[in-house]
Image (cartoon, grey):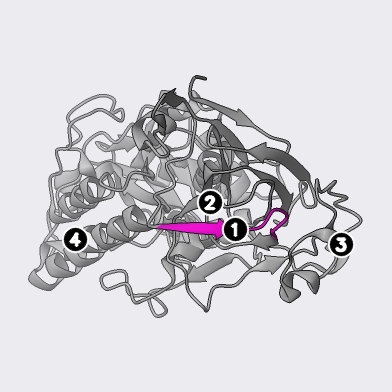
Amino acid sequence: MSDLKITETSIPGLLVVDLPVHGDNRGWFKENWQREKMVAAGLPDFGPVQNSIAYNAAVGTTRGFHAEPWDKFVSVASGRIFGAWVDLREGHSFGAVFTIELGPDRAVFVPRGVGNSYQTLEADTVYAYLVNDHWSPDAEYSFLNLADETAGVDWPIPLAEAVLSEKDRAHPRLADVASVPPRRTLILGADGQLGRALRAELGTAAHLEYVTRADFDITAPGPRHWRDYGTIINAAAYTAVDAAETAQGRADAWAVNASGPAALARIAAANGINLVHVSSDYVFDGDSELYDEESALSPLGVYGQSKAAGDLAVQTAPRHYIVRTSWVIGDGGNFVRTMASLAERGIHPRVVHDQRGRLTFASDLARGIRHLLDTGAPFGTYDLTGSGEPAAWSDIAREVFALSGHDPVRVTPVSTAEYYADAAGPIAPRPRNSVLDLAKIEGTGFAAADWRRSLREYLVPDDR
């Protein structure tokens, strides 16, 4: 009896699983699928939803190459089969081949888009497969001809003597195969500062789907074939901090920042999707000098409370990244653009001096999100802001004035209480300190840019 062992192959993601088989004079027994043990050994937690069984009476019965739009765990119940796989996914491994014999003591995990084929070596062979999507006649496959010369599979039983379907005989050669694209990525909030930065960072490949509030209602996600999606990036948010203190604003903030992420978390959990959710420094009260990912949530106002609720909801999705940030600056209206405009117009602004933090440029935030996804960093919460020495809003305003060629003394520092003393409408409480600890994301190999350097590049793009 062998131990449970999982071995990588020459095709990325295709895994061979050696299964312990317990035998005696009565026959044998095996645990064909045991989630806890297999995931601990290195098998993806792929979430099977359907179990199918294939029976082949004759030796030489051959099926394939079918690249299906789901992941698949294939094992033998009786007999032996020769398995062959060809990678039909877009990318550097397209066309890679792997073959192996399978019996009751060996199974194979086949990732979505890898063409699989099986040839029976014994009569009355039975093999089973678990898949993580329900079979549908509308499912889109890619196929490869079993006799493709490029793949060059050395079939134990020559195809001329094998039992094949007419469809399998007619499938295209590798040069004519439509490669399988990656699972789709849905980016919400595509018209915001971060959304535009994500478009610049990720590009416009066919599998990337950018949607705005007009296209997609986060509070009531419509029907989609969610198994086609591998990642959802939620860059949508209600950010009108002061308006959130009104009756209508409170309802809107909770709908977008809490109920919406909860709906996305349910979808992600049910379909094995990576969910990236952008959080805020406003989930803290600002009374500590530094906040890390384990700091207790302590929001002051409605906006912060709704964002904290959204964070808690997203944590229910097994494959989640909560990216907590602060003071985002990108392509659109923001504090830096406002200060630069005031400087140009000769206005002497009053800016608060008792709120400290770091600017986060949307391009850096988008780069960090891509880093987490591309490196497969452990799921969880990550703080992500610009690096460097924290500063007050008034300090930042003065740097904007100086970089724009204006006298920074024109900026007058005032307290938050003084600044809002004459405000006509409701004013949300602000955290006094918004400095986030970057150690965790830096531990994954990501280096956030110094916010002062990014500010200079933002305002003086030719001075790099």
Q: Position of residue 98 (x, y in %)?
A: 74, 42
Q: Could you tell me the amino acid type at mark 3?
A: Ala
> Residue at label 2?
126
- Residue drawn at x 42%, y 54% as measured from the top left: 273
Quarter of the image with the C terminus is top right
> Residue at label 3?
160
Q: Which residues are magenta?
A: 51-62
> Residue at label 4?
242
Q: Secondary structure at mark 2?
A: strand
Few, some or many residues within 10 Å of mark 4 (<14, 14–19, 20+):
some
Q: Could you tell me the amino acid type at mark 4?
A: Asp
Q: Could you tell me the amino acid type at mark 2?
A: Val
Residue 323 sits in which quadrant? Answer: top left
Q: Considering depth in this image, is 68 or 364 the residue closer to the camera? A: 68
- Asked if residue 34 lies left or right of residue 8, the reply is left
Q: Give the distance between the C-alpha atoms of the residues marked 3 and 4, in whole angstroms.
A: 75 Å
Which residue sits furthest left? 247
